[in-house]
Structure formats: structure tokens, C-alpha cells
Image (cartoon, rainbow, N blue to C red):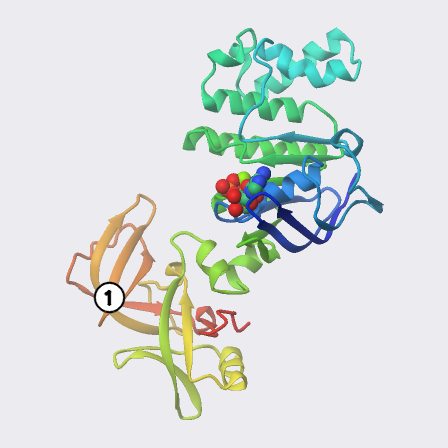
Amino acid sequence: MTEVRIDKVNKIYERGNVHAVQNLNLQIKDGEFVALLGPSGCGKTSTLRMIVGLEAISSGTIRFDDVIVNDFTPEQRNVAMAFESYALYPNLSIAENLAFPLEVRGIPLSERTKEVNRIAEMLQITELLDQRPGQLSGGQQQRVSLGRALIREPAVFILDEVLSHLDAHLKFQMLFELKKIHYSLGKTMVYVTHDQMEALALSDRVAVMANAKLQQFGNRNELYHKPINRFVADFIGEPSTNFLNARISSVDKKIVLEVNADLRFHPDSRRQDLIKEKGLEEVLIGIRPQYLTLQDGPVKESVTAEVLINEYLGERNILEVKNGSEKFRAVVPPECRAIRGDRVTLFYEPNHVLAFDPQTEECLL
Ligand SMILES: Nc1ncnc2c1ncn2[C@@H]1O[C@H](COP(=O)(O)OP(=O)(O)OP(=O)(O)O)[C@@H](O)[C@H]1O
Ligand SMILES: [Mg+2]
């Protein structure tokens, strides 16, 4: 069992002088499933490669439990990894590729075969066992590569975009399998993805990265309801958060966030206090489309808007609406038949109105 602790880690690539990871602090608990999530180029793979030992650390320390592993080889660290590029042995069959890590450890043939069959069944690649990597599609090779990592019994699993080449249906099945594997093995897993759905579906906690820096490390509830800044509020959730610039005015000592004369939001009392404390004149409002609803309710406030698009997505619709020059979105039930030009009233709970400092883009939490 292994805890991975990253302290003040930097990665500077001399070639191109890229500061790819800046002052990263991350403590991954023993047995925890953590996703590194962020847009392309934010430093996810660089971080993983430093954890694995494939890339030197420019400064800082990485510990496995209490042992500093900065100078350990990947073998000494005992991590199993699977990357987006499959790196399979082209001259070995799929079965031999899967069995390779077991063979290295001197596991007898009968046991190897049993393990290979078990993993192949789990990843739905049994019928491919006699083929060579060159005969397989990208998604199939990706599953073999994942299988080769899973067949080992390492201290830590490191998985980098391992489901990216799978179609949506298979991806869901594999996410489910990975989750089951994690439950049954209880091993520390670090999973890299730029897909927030994958990250939120799989992980105990998600480390959101952008521009080489960790933005926020938390569980889905924290990321969803208490985003640290605009970036996280925008990146987490689908459809993403609506952002609106508003002036702060005061009515009967209560703060009102005025987007325009006809579009006003009322934050809850806690945020009212935070906004007052900050002494801001303007604020950036964030409100998730899920929290602008068509149903009425006793403690709700409302705004009105004109429908631009009603997008039918099966189990829900997404309305794109406008009020003056402001456009935003709302998630509504599939029964909603509103068409372009209709006016709708959208209700919200004041505690779902997020407020951001317009300069720093930090959320007032
Ligand atoms: N070997 C290298 N030499 C020089 N620069 C590199 C090297 N590897 C990565 N970089 C740069 O470091 C930055 C972070 O790259 P990294 O691969 O860690 O990003 P990522 O978050 O994994 O992105 P993606 O989602 O596209 O895989 C990028 O600007 C990249 O160009
Ligand atoms: Mg990457």
C-alpha cells in the first residue's frame, strides 16, 4: 500500500525552456483513485512521468510513503503504467504481450495463462489473444496496453489517457471495469485525462491543472459546488457554468447583482457578506445551467429570458436564452416545447449564485 506525496515539484524542459509543471503539491492517499484533469499541454503527462520515474524532476521531492524516490528507477518504484500510445511488443502475440510482466517475475505458465484469460475477458479482448498488435485497431491496442498494466501487482497504477481511443459505449464499460478493479485491488491509482466526465466518474478526488499549475484538488462535490476560480467552474460540469458581468447595487441593505436593468440575481446571505467584505463594485456571476430551472418553488428567485435554441438531448433539453445582449443556458426537462422567440421564466436558488472577483477570477467562497 502506497501513499504518493509530491512536494514543490517543478519540471523545466531545457529544450524549448518550457516550465511544464510549476510548484506542484499533491498528496495522494494510500489506495486512493486520483485523476489529473486539465486541458492539453497543462503538464499532466509530465507529472505522471515524474511519478513513474521516466522523467527527472527539476526541483522538489516525490515520496512513496516516507521514502524519497527522486533517484529511483521505474522498476525500483514498482509502478505499473499504461499510456495512450500503446508500446506493445510487435512480434509477440496479444497473449504474450499480456503475459510478459508475469514472465519477468517468474510466474509459472499455468498461472500466467489463467491470469491472461481473466484480464482478457474483463477487457473484452479474448478473441484477440492469438493476434499481433499490428492487426489491432487503436482502441483494441489501448485495451491490451491497459491489460498489461493491470496484470501486474504494483504499488501504484499510473494510467495516461488509456481510454481515449474507445467509442463512447465501450468507454463507459471500461470506466465501470476500472472502477471495479480499483475496488477489488484497493491500490493507489493516478489516472490522467482531459475529459472531465471520465475524471469525475472514476475518481475519489480530482486534481484540476491549467497552465502548469494545480488549480484545485477536491472531490466532485467540492469541484462542482465550491470551485476555487473561474477556470474550475468553467471546466467542470456539462454544459459549463454561465458567466455574467454584474454591477453590485444595494436594495434595502441587501445586495443585488445587476447584469442589466431587466436581469438581476440575488445571492444568498453568505455571499452577500463576502461581496460586502471585498468592497467590490462589480462581480462576475457564475450560475450552472442545471440550477436555472422551469419549475417554481417557495425559496426560489427568477429571471426571464427569450429562447434562442431548444436543444433536445433525450433525457434533458438545453435551452439557450438571451436577455438583452446576455446569452446563457438552462437545463430543462425533455417535455419543454419552448421554441425560438418564446419568453421563459427561469428559477434559481440564491445559494447557487456563485460570485467571482472580476480581476483575480477567484471565487468568493
Ligand atoms: N520532452 C519534452 N521536451 C520539451 N517540452 C516538452 C516535453 N514534453 C512536454 N513538453 C512541454 O511541456 C508542456 C506540458 O506537456 P505535457 O505533455 O505534460 O502536457 P499534457 O497535460 O499531458 O497535455 P496533453 O493533454 O496534450 O497530453 C507542453 O507545453 C509541452 O509542449
Ligand atoms: Mg498528456
Q: Residue at x 48, y 69 (%)?
A: 361
Residue 33 location, quadrant: top right
* Residue at the farthest right position: 66
Q: Height in image: 201 above or below 214?
A: above
Query: Residue 249: horizontal and vertical position, in percent?
Result: 38, 87
What secondary structure is found at the residue carrying circle 1?
A: strand
Amino acid at dot 1 = Lys
Q: Position of residue 139 (x, y in %)?
A: 47, 24
Decide if residue 326 is on the left or right side of residue 113.
Answer: left
- Vertically, is 46 above or below 208? above
The quadrant of the rendering that contains the C terminus is bottom right
User: As rendered, which of 165 and 16 lies closer to the eye?
Assistant: 16
Q: Is residue 193 left or right of residue 234?
A: right
Residue 99 quadrant = top right
The residue under the point 69% across, 44% down is: 32
Q: In x, y percent, where is residue 165? A: 46, 29
Q: Residue 320 location in percent, x, y?
A: 26, 58
Q: Which residue is mark 1?
A: 322
Figure quadrant of residue 341: bottom left
User: Does residue 55 sit above or below 232 in this rendering?
Assistant: above
Q: Is residue 292 visible?
A: yes
Count residues near mark 1 (Cα–Cα under 10 Å), then give few for <14, some for 14-19, many for 20+: some
Q: Please name whichever residue, 144 or 25, is drawn nearer the observer in this view of the structure.
A: 25
309 and 22: which is toward the camera: 22
Taking the spot 73% from the left edge, 17% from the top edge, the residue there is: 102
Position of the N terminus by quadrant = top right
**Vertical relation: 15 (above or below) 220:** above
Some atom of ligand 1 lies within 8 Å of the CB belonging to the residue at label 1: no
Residue positioned most to the left = 341
Q: Nearer the viewer, residue 304 or 55?
A: 55
Question: Which residue is depicted at the point 68% across and 10% down?
Answer: 113
Q: Quadrant of ligand 2?
A: top right
